[in-house]
């Protein structure tokens, strides 16, 4: 998904959303290894630390109106920026970027032009692929060095035993003696950083699996032993950069890569769907954290709990499918930014703005169409927003379209089938033996 700054006007500091948002059931991707130095702006002398990617992207949007798509799929952000910094001194930005004009139907003074740099440009796509290949080669080289290293020295995380030689001695000891298995040693890279991260959590009295914090080490050890929490949390993507599998295909975690491998193995087997179970889609309310499995239930919840009737708005405003998408994304964004979409008043928390919407009767007060019927609201505020998948045009749209075009409706033939069969010429031919000669 593209990295966007699609606030209401794309001009305010508080309206800049520079990372794709997700509802809680989907976690973000892991980060790649950090690098030293600072990252210079592609269009000006200003620099930012590599760890402050969000502030760097905010600077590009606010100062230069430049949006870089799919930042998390760029293997080496610093090298990527340095490349485009050089290219943008050689040719104008319009030679490389798509131009997006916001508020296109509004007054000229409120219109703004934004530039989108993405892999739709062949040069950008090739650069990203080269950076990914280079990163993979660096990681594999680092992994081989760690495999061959014989000067590794470290104390066990769970006891006082000290190990010298190859890292596999320590990892195998923790797996065998303490039931702490982080996978095969040959699958791990940046092992010292990995162990440092685990040690820091234990020093902070934090469980490695559930990540709860305890009052002392004795309580922590008892908890991890009794709850069988001597393992890492696979959903914590902080650990992704320590496993080689996460570098094989950028943008995919080890779980996704492994599931693809499993599907390829299953292709040679007979299809058996007897034990397949569908995972229900959870639709999240526009105003709170409530989730429902069906559109009817979420519509009923929003109407009963918040007084919001999307079906009524669809009928009153004569909204087609893509207009509903824009309106939902607009409301999602305004609520996320703690701003009332009815009066534009700003609040300190999401709970306050939801309370205001109800008390001020602004929940059904949708602003002028020009405020939300804009191209930037084609993009979802939350990338896993299941509510968008359940939207549909009015049930009468297709029927009205048929009537308006005056298309004839031909009824089915309700003749007696037995009469047709008895009078059939084919029957006479079958009876006449000369017909077959």
Image (spheres, rainbow, N blue to C red):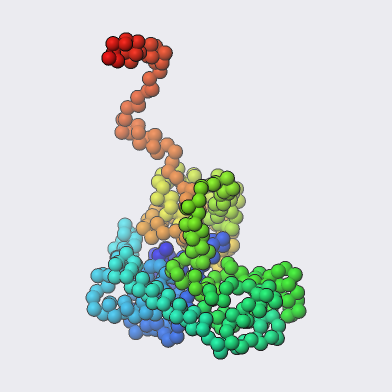
Check the image and report above or below for 200 versus 297.
below
Left or right: 293 as drawn, with respect to 129: right
Check the image and report above or below for 158 versus 129.
below
Q: Nearer the viewer, residue 103 or 332?
A: 332
Residue 149: give x, y in percent of width and height.
53, 86
Q: Is residue 65 visible?
A: no
Identify the residue at horizontal 29%, vertical 80% (top origin): 86
Identify the residue at horizontal 40%, vertical 46% (top origin): 320
Residue 216 appears in which quarter of the rendering?
bottom right
Residue 281: give x, y in percent of width and height.
54, 52
Q: Is residue 418 visible?
A: yes
Residue 362: give x, y in percent of width and height.
52, 54
Left or right: 172 as drawn, with respect to 214: left
Residue 376: give x, y in percent of width and height.
38, 60
Residue at far front of view: 437
Quadrant for the C terminus in the image: top left
């Amino acid at each position: 998904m593209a990295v966007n700054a699609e606030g209401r006007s794309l001009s305010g500091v508080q309206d800049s959303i520079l990372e794709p948002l997700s509802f809680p059931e989907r976690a973000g991707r892991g980060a790649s290894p950090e690098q030293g130095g600072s990252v210079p702006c592609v269009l000006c002398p200003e620099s930012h630390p590599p760890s402050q990617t969000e502030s760097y992207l905010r600077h590009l949007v606010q100062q230069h109106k430049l949006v870089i798509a799919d930042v998390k799929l760029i293997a080496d952000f610093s090298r990527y920026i340095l490349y485009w910094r050089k290219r943008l001194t050689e040719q104008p930005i319009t030679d490389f970027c798509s131009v997006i004009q916001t508020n296109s139907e509004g007054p000229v003074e409120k219109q703004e032009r934004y530039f989108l740099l993405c892999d739709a440009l062949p040069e950008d796509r090739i650069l990203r692929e080269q950076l990914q290949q280079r990163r993979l080669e660096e990681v594999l080289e680092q992994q081989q060095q760690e495999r061959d290293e014989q000067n590794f020295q470290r104390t066990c995380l769970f006891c006082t035993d000290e190990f010298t030689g190859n890292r596999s001695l320590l990892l195998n000891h923790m797996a065998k003696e303490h039931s702490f298995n982080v996978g095969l040693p040959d699958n791990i890279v940046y092992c010292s950083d990995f162990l440092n991260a685990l040690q820091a959590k234990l020093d902070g009295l934090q469980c490695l699996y559930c990540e709860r914090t305890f009052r002392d080490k004795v309580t922590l050890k008892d908890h991890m032993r009794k709850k069988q929490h001597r393992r890492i949390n696979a959903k914590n993507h902080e650990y992704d950069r320590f496993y080689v599998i996460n570098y094989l295909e950028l943008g995919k975690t080890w779980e996704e890569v492994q599931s693809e491998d499993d599907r390829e193995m299953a292709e040679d087997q007979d299809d058996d769907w007897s034990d397949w179970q569908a995972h229900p889609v959870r639709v999240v309310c526009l105003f709170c954290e409530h989730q429902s499995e069906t559109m009817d239930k979420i519509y009923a919840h929003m109407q009963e709990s918040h007084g919001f009737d999307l079906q009524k708005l669809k009928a009153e405003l004569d909204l087609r499918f893509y207009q509903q998408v824009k309106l939902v994304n607009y409301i999602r964004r305004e609520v996320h930014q703690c701003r009332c979409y009815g009066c534009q008043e700003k609040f300190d928390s999401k709970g306050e703005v939801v309370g205001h919407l109800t008390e001020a009767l602004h929940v059904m007060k949708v602003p002028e169409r020009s405020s939300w019927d804009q191209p930037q609201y084609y993009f979802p505020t939350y990338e896993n927003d299941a509510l968008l998948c359940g939207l549909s045009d009015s049930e009468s749209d297709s029927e009205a379209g048929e009537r308006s075009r005056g298309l004839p409706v031909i009824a089915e033939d309700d003749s007696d089938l037995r009469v047709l069969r008895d009078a059939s010429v084919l029957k006479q031919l079958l009876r006449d033996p000369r017909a077959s000669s």
